[in-house]
Image (cartoon, rainbow, N blue to C red):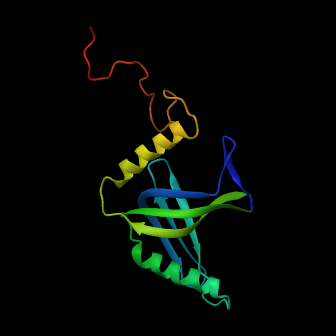
């Protein structure tokens, strides 16, 4: 298994919260859809080996069919999956899909990612996160407080 690294820390599993933008199901091969998490559209894949004699592959087929029944365009979903490489490209193989009913789920997830980035990956305040957020104010004064 090839590991991916972020600042020297191995990453093999990820969670994405976003809107479903693209959806494609080929019954004998795979389920593929794209999730827009606010930074970019991420392609997700669930292999569908319905004709395989392996019990594990048929289990994946059942999951893929259940995911296909849940996924609809423009809904907010939480997708968990395993990171891997295929022909040099990074791909996410889905392990779970949950339709989110809370409209604030994307905002909560973004805030949790900011805390994780700050506390675990040692990104300093004021740098922003991959150009998504602007600089964070690092002075002791809060933006809503008056200057003296």
Estimate the x, y position of residue 128 in percent, counting from the top left: 49, 32
- 61, above or below 148, in the image: below
Left or right: where 22 falls relative to 120: left
Q: Is residue 85 visible?
A: yes
Residue at the image point whose x is 51% and y is 79% from the top: 63
Estimate the x, y position of residue 71 in percent, counting from the top left: 42, 72
Name of the residue lying farthest toward the front: 119
Estimate the x, y position of residue 20 in percent, counting from the top left: 42, 63
Left or right: where 82 falls relative to 69: right
Instruction: Pick the quarter of the image with the N terminus.
Output: bottom right
Tell me where residue 12 sits by quadrant: bottom right
Estimate the x, y position of residue 91 in percent, counting from the top left: 63, 61
Tell me where residue 36 sits by quadrant: bottom left
Q: Tell which of 103 and 24 is nearer to you.
A: 103
Residue at the image point whose x is 66% and y is 40% from the top: 7
Instruction: Pick the quarter of the image with the C terminus.
Output: top left
Residue at the image point whose x is 48% and y is 57% from the top: 16
- 69, above or below 82, in the image: below
Name of the residue lying farthest toward the top: 148
Q: Tell which of 19 and 136 is nearer to you.
A: 136
């Amino acid at each position: 298994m090839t590991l991916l690294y972020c600042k020297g820390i191995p990453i093999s599993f990820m969670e994405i919260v976003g809107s479903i933008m693209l959806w494609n199901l080929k019954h004998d091969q795979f389920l593929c859809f794209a999730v827009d998490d606010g930074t970019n559209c991420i392609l997700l894949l669930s292999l569908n080996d319905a004709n395989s004699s392996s019990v594990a592959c048929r289990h994946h087929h059942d999951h893929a069919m259940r995911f296909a029944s849940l996924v609809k365009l423009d809904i907010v979903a939480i997708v968990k999956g395993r990171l891997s490489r295929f022909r040099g490209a990074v791909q996410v193989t889905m392990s779970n899909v949950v339709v989110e009913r809370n409209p604030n789920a994307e905002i909560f997830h973004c805030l949790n990612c900011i805390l994780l980035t700050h506390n675990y990956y040692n990104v300093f305040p004021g740098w922003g996160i991959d150009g998504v957020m602007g600089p964070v104010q690092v002075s002791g004064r809060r933006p809503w407080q008056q200057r003296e």
